[in-house]
Image (cartoon, rainbow, N blue to C red):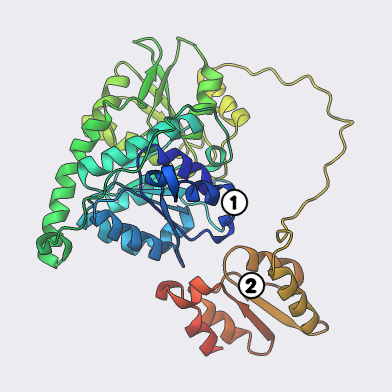
Amino acid sequence: MIKKYFDLAFLAGFELLFSCKEKDKGTKYEKRICHGQSGENKDKAVHVEWSINEKAAMEVAAGASYAGARCLVTMKMMGLNVASDALMSLAYVGVEGGLVVVSADDPGPISSQTEQDTRLFAKYCRIPVFDPSSVEEAYEMIQDAFEYSEKYKTPVLFRPTTRIDHAYGSITYDENAKPKDVPGFVKNSKRFVIFPRLSRMNHEMIEKRNPAIGDDFSEYKFNTVQGTNGNKKAVLAGGAGYAYAKEFIQDREDVTLIRVATPHPLPEKFLLGALEGVEEVLVVEELFPYLEEELLQLIGKKQLKIKVLGKHTLNSPLAGENTAEGVAAEIAKFLGDTIEESKAHTSDIPTPPMRPPVLCAGCPHRASFYAVKQAMKGRKANFSGDIGCYTLYGRRHHHGSGPSLDGYGDCKLRICRRLHILCVRHDGNCKCDLQRSGYDSLRAG
């Protein structure tokens, strides 16, 4: 995923990338970054840094942005939790060089502990967010994100979801693109030293600025309307849900398809124009009913008589990932259509074998965990790990592997005193991030 967004952002002229995804080291992505470090291509070089965790990555990127460099910070939505302290302050301080935070959401979830929605974080932090529906759009949007970041001096969130992250698309780009010049840091205590008085002033500035960004987004090229004027029914969608809705509706003229690619700040003028004459709206989106609630608030504020259907009315699933078939069924029911069932015979197709996730081939944790398994053989043991692979191993090889230590390891370890307890954490969680530190829990045990 990180490699893709490096390639997409390269054309925006960014200079630095920060991430804590260590498993991406040594890939084609790293080779692409190293290309141009010497010789005639030296001016195309991009600095990349693997930080100990997402918060550290965000803070280093902020410093580079203050100096005028364009920066890309990449993580998944749970990493945004870790980086939120830095991001919230950064939203108040602002940026110089464009700073785009790619926070990949995981509807499903497929490889995460929670189903979080980055659009809510954007509203919480009071910063813009872009929501692409295809790889091709992501290519153009991430360049626009840098432009908006510098225009309004604010960090910008970029929210792709699973089907965008794991998709491929054909794009054409300028091979002569290179990073922009970095002017350097200019000392300004009235801006960069964020005392309470300045925080209040900046908060007021942000609240006055965001409606202007919403008006700007009302003219944004990826906020679109398809359909004949005067339609009574409309489908409002964003992200991957828009792609599925577009696939089903195609060129129908009896329903209006409204696409919002910039959920926050909400492009109110665009929506009011698109909803003119509409009496009923079906909202198609993944995870939280964000667009649905924003639309309800706008309708209430403008005292419009429009019925809104979506997750709150149980016309859309409350959790999980959207599918083309599921969205087609939702829209068909909304329009009073019927979908012909597939006539393919599937009764003779064998059930696919179960393929639980495993540690990657060659992973050094394989040997470590094998040693653990041998040491705990025949003993009543409890395995406590943190995120990702540690939890994966514990679920397969130990009795009643508990959830992550993050936040409540102290309680769990006290309860399990009579067991043989093995705690495994990666160094980023133990060393640098006090909010996720496991040391207090380990001492308490």
Dot 1: within a 10 Å radius of its alpha carbon, few (fewer than 14), some, or many (20 or more) residues? few
Give the image location of residue 44, x and y in percent: 40, 44
Give the image location of residue 299, x and y in percent: 28, 31
The residue located at (68%, 90%) in the rendering is 418
Which residue is identified by label 2?
402
Residue 245 shows up from this direction: yes
Name the secondary structure under disc 2.
loop
Q: Which mark is residue 415?
A: none
Q: Can you name the residue that lies furthest to the right here?
A: 348
Q: Amino acid at mark 2?
A: Gly
Residue 134 shows up from this direction: no
Q: Are marks 1 and 2 in contact (CB under 8 Å)?
A: no
Name the secondary structure under disc 1.
loop
Give the image location of residue 410, x and y in percent: 52, 82
Question: Where, by quadrant of the figure, is residue 320 drawn?
Answer: top right
Give the image location of residue 304, x and y in percent: 26, 26
The residue located at (31%, 52%) in the rendering is 124
Instruction: Pick whichever, 240 or 4, lies toward us.
Output: 4
Rounded to the nearest angstrom, the CA distance separating label 1 from label 2 is 33 Å
Q: Amino acid at mark 1?
A: Thr
Instruction: Pick whichever, 201 or 364, lies toward us.
Output: 364
The residue located at (24%, 56%) in the rendering is 66
Dot 2: within a 10 Å radius of its alpha carbon, few (fewer than 14), some, or many (20 or more) residues? some
Which residue is identified by label 1?
27
Specify whether 420 is left or right of 161: right
On-image quarter of the C terminus: bottom right
Specify whether 109 is left or right of 154: right
- Numbered disc total: 2
The residue located at (60%, 84%) in the rendering is 415
**Vertical order, 53 against 420 (above or below):** above
